[in-house]
């Protein structure tokens, strides 16, 4: 399930929020006991698999870390209220992309359409077999994107668009309403500086690390699971608010095992490549930014919850830097 990670990247690219009434069922409710056991085992094998809110301390230095969910949800209100006092007393707030980076990114996209669209070489109908292209046309039409536009999209951007369930059609130019946006608003209200963990164009480097065939595989995988898009989004939200974000990633892996055409070993290899590109490489780049910010005082960092767990997750990396970690609660 790459949907939440890709959707977060899409929000940072568009500065838009999805405003829709999407009704979906939690996929966990329909799982067998053996499937639930397999999921729990995969999650528990990862360090720092549970928990959305942490304190990392080294001597007198403290970083409060909030793993976020990028989509709007009324359940964010309680979390934001709980986090507000810590944000107000921080010297700096770090986020994946701040207002300045979003503006820089939009300016760059407007000047260089090749970042998002294919301007030379073959188009997607030429890259994909006809049945796959027609399936993509149908999926994109359900999202109000005509075939001639989809044909010219960069493959990774197509996957990001597929991350939006068809029910979420109305896009509003009001900024993302997930927990990240609430953190930024609270920092602005208190006059706390907000800075980005990475440069505005980091998102493009992420996909430069993936080959064309890997990007096309991402389209195929996301497309194969498109019929359950609403259920996937409902499940991801419930898992996040259950403070079990790693289960989002591992559930996607288990669902992918049931797709035809690839062995489990091949799927595991694909997931490792994508996790390295989407999360781990970025995590390693964020650590020096976070520790350098401590020179100014207490730090509050907010970023997607999928970045927290794993051997190369932010928490494990901080632990290797000598930080003591304590799980807190919203």
Image (spheres, helix red, strand yellow):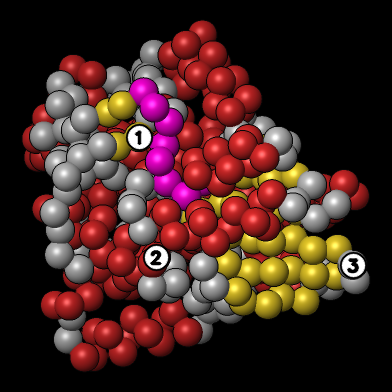
Residue 15, image quadrant: top left
Q: Which is nearer the N-term, disc 2 or disc 1?
A: 1
Q: Main secondary structure of the magenta part?
A: loop
Which residue, given by chain and number where applicable, does mark 2 sit on? Answer: 240
Residue 94, image quadrant: top right
Which residue, given by chain and number where applicable, does mark 3 sit on? Answer: 60
Q: For mark 3, does the 10 Å Cα neighbourhood hold few (<14), some (14 to 19), or many (20 or more) residues?
A: few
Per the rendered image, the range of residues in magenta is 173-180
Q: Residue at x 55, y 16 (%)?
A: 108
314 vs 126: above or below = below
278 vs 16: above or below = below
Which residue, given by chain and number where applicable, does mark 1 sit on? Answer: 17
Q: Is residue 212 magenta?
A: no
Q: Nearer the viewer, residue 247 or 325?
A: 325
- How far apart, in angstroms, are the residues tagged by discs 2 and 3? 30 Å
- x, y percentage for residue 39? 34, 81
Q: Residue at x 66, y 33 (%)?
A: 199
């Amino acid at each position: 399930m790459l949907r939440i990670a890709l959707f977060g990247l899409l929000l940072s690219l568009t500065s838009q929020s999805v405003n829709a009434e999407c009704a979906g069922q939690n996929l966990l409710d329909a799982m067998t006991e053996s499937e639930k056991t397999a999921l729990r085992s995969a999650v528990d094998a990862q360090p720092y698999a549970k928990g959305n809110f942490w304190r990392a301390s080294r001597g007198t230095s403290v970083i409060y870390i909030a793993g976020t969910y990028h989509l709007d949800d009324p359940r964010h209100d309680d979390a934001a209220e709980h986090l507000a006092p810590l944000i107000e007393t921080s010297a700096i707030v770090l986020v994946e992309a701040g207002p300045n980076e979003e503006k820089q990114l939009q300016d760059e996209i407007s000047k260089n359409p090749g970042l998002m669209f294919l301007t030379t070489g073959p188009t997607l109908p030429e890259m994909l077999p006809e049945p796959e292209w027609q399936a993509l046309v149908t999926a994109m039409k359900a999202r109000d994107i005509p075939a001639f536009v989809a044909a010219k999209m960069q493959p990774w951007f197509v996957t990001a668009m597929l991350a939006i369930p068809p029910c979420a059609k109305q896009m509003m130019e009001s900024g993302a309403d997930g927990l990240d946006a609430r953190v930024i608003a609270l920092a602005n209200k208190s006059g706390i500086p907000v800075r980005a963990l990475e440069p505005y164009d980091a998102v493009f480097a992420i996909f430069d690390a993936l080959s064309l065939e890997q990007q096309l595989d991402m389209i195929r995988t996301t497309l194969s699971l498109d019929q359950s898009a609403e259920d996937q989004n409902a499940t991801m939200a419930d898992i996040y608010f259950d403070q079990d974000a790693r289960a989002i990633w591992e559930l996607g892996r288990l669902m992918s095992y049931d797709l035809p055409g690839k062995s489990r070993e091949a799927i595991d290899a694909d997931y490792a490549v994508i996790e390295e590109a989407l999360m781990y490489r970025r995590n390693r780049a964020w650590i020096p930014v976070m520790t350098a910010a401590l020179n100014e005082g207490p730090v509050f960092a907010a970023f997607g919850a999928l970045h927290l767990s794993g051997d190369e997750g932010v928490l494990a990396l901080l632990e290797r830097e000598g930080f003591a970690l304590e799980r807190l609660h919203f």
